[in-house]
């Protein structure tokens, strides 16, 4: 079973996943990466600690095979 690592970027801060997790396929790893990214982004956005969260998914020690990017953009309307 392939082992996937989820490296997390919160703005410029990198949290490298040294251990990884086993998933049956890239599709299963993609779903978990989206859930993980959404959960981390929610906490970071509410806390104000980041405006962007990126999950780079690597299979074993290879280059990333998938990237999940979640960005917070807040627009305030101009007073008219």
Image (spheres, grey):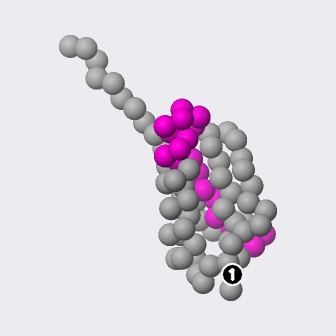
Q: How many marks?
A: 1
Residue 38 position, x and y percent, is: 49, 54
Seen in the picture, residue 48 relative to 39 is either above or below; the reply is above
Measuring 50% from the left and 62% from the top, which residue is drawn there?
35
Disc 1: which residue: 2
Residue 34 position, x and y percent, is: 50, 62
Residue 47 position, x and y percent, is: 54, 35
Looking at the image, which is closer to me, 78 or 8? 8
Q: In which quadrant is the C terminus drawn?
A: top left
> Mark 1, residues whose alpha carbon is within 10 Å: few (<14), some, or many (≥20)?
few
In this picture, residue 77 sits left or right of residue 24: left
Does residue 62 appear in the picture of this structure?
no
Does residue 66 appear in the picture of this structure?
yes
Q: In which quadrant is the N terminus drawn?
A: bottom right
Measuring 49% from the left and 37% from the top, which residue is drawn there?
46
**Magenta span has 55?**
yes
Kindly indicate the quadrant of the structure image that contains residue 68. bottom right
Measuring 55% from the left and 41% from the top, which residue is drawn there?
44
Seen in the picture, residue 80 relative to 51 is either above or below; the reply is above
The residue segment tinted magenta is 41-62
Measuring 65% from the left and 52% from the top, which residue is drawn there?
8
SS state under label 1: loop
In this picture, residue 32 sits left or right of residue 15: left
In this picture, residue 50 sits left or right of residue 46: right
């Amino acid at each position: 079973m392939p082992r996937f690592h989820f490296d997390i970027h919160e703005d410029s801060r990198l949290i490298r996943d040294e251990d990884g997790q086993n998933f049956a396929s890239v599709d299963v790893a993609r779903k978990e990466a989206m859930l993980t990214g959404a959960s981390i982004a929610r906490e970071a956005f509410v806390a104000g600690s980041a405006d962007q969260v990126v999950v780079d998914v690597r299979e074993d020690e290879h280059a990333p095979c998938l990237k999940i990017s979640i960005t917070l953009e807040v627009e305030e309307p101009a007073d008219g």
